[in-house]
Image (cartoon, coloured by chain):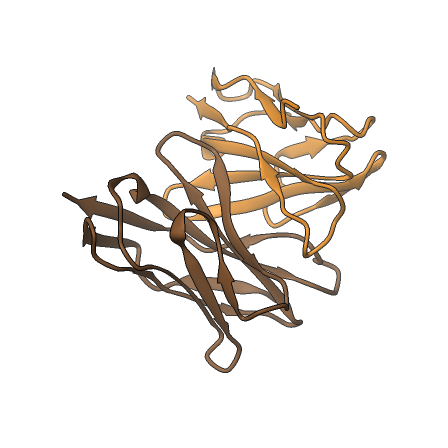
Chain colours: A brown, B orange
Amino acid sequence: AQSVTQLDSHVSVSEGTPVLLRCNYSSSYSPSLFWYVQHPNKGLQLLLKYTSAATLVKGINGFEAEFKKSETSFHLTKPSAHMSDAAEYFCVVSDRYGGSQGNLIFGKGTKLSVKP
Amino acid sequence: NAGVTQTPKFQVLKTGQSMTLQCAQDMNHEYMSWYRQDPGMGLRLIHYSVGAGITDQGEVPNGYNVSRSTTEDFPLRLLSAAPSQTSVYFCASSYVRGITDTQYFGPGTRLTVL
């Protein structure tokens, strides 16, 4: 069975400093992994996804994530935070095979605050 | 393309009432799903459909029914609303039930059950 653990429920950074949002996963099969972002009172937008190609995945708005199988991690990073990055971020896993193939399992979310 | 649309945006129900949350997509997507979002819980899968006439249960299906008579529409029915169903509901769709395929989310319906 798949599961996702987002290690921090809340992260606060200053504008212009790096962002690190941590995510660990477990999966019975080779997983696909995603990061979604949700701005206040909005729907969800895909930031980036890993589907077995390059382990370093680049997404929108300067975000990237690295798939590390040995550590079962998929941490999200950005070199320099912007005020508009303040939002909630969800790490998501999906099995490639099996009865739950394609269904998304969400982590509980990390709220990112950006201070001026 | 309008993408994934959901109606209504907000709804208040009394315990025991029934209602249907509407979801439609105009991208000819085969796979559609419903999630609920509760504070500190992330999103949890309620029901999903891999094509017209085919539905299946997700992680939290109790108290909800779905049907898929057309490719475009995937309504979620609450048969007898309970306060525990107070939540934000999101519908999502993708071209196929594929692990490489991006799922697109609607704007959500905020439901309060008194």
The N terminus of chain B is located in which quarter? top right
Q: What residue is rendered at 53% in x and 78% in y? A: A69
Q: What residue is rendered at 26% in x and 51% in y? A: A81
Q: What residue is rendered at 51% in x and 53% in y? A: A48
The C terminus of chain B is located in which quarter? top left
The furthest residue to the right: B53
Left or right, A54 with reference to B72: left
User: Compared with residue B32, is residue B6 higher up or lower down, i.e. above or below?
Assistant: above
Give the camera-side residue of B97 and B14.
Answer: B97
Left or right, B25 with reference to A80: right
The percent position of residue B50, horizontal first and vertical second, equals 78, 43
The percent position of residue A1, horizontal first and vertical second, equals 61, 67
The furthest residue to the left: A116
The percent position of residue A40, horizontal first and vertical second, equals 35, 33
Residue A105, located in which quarter of the rendered image? bottom right
Give the camera-side residue of B88 and B78.
Answer: B88
Residue B63, located in which quarter of the rendered image? top right
Q: What residue is rendered at 47% in x and 40% in y? A: B37
Give the camera-side residue of A49 and A91.
Answer: A49
Residue B25, located in which quarter of the rendered image? top right
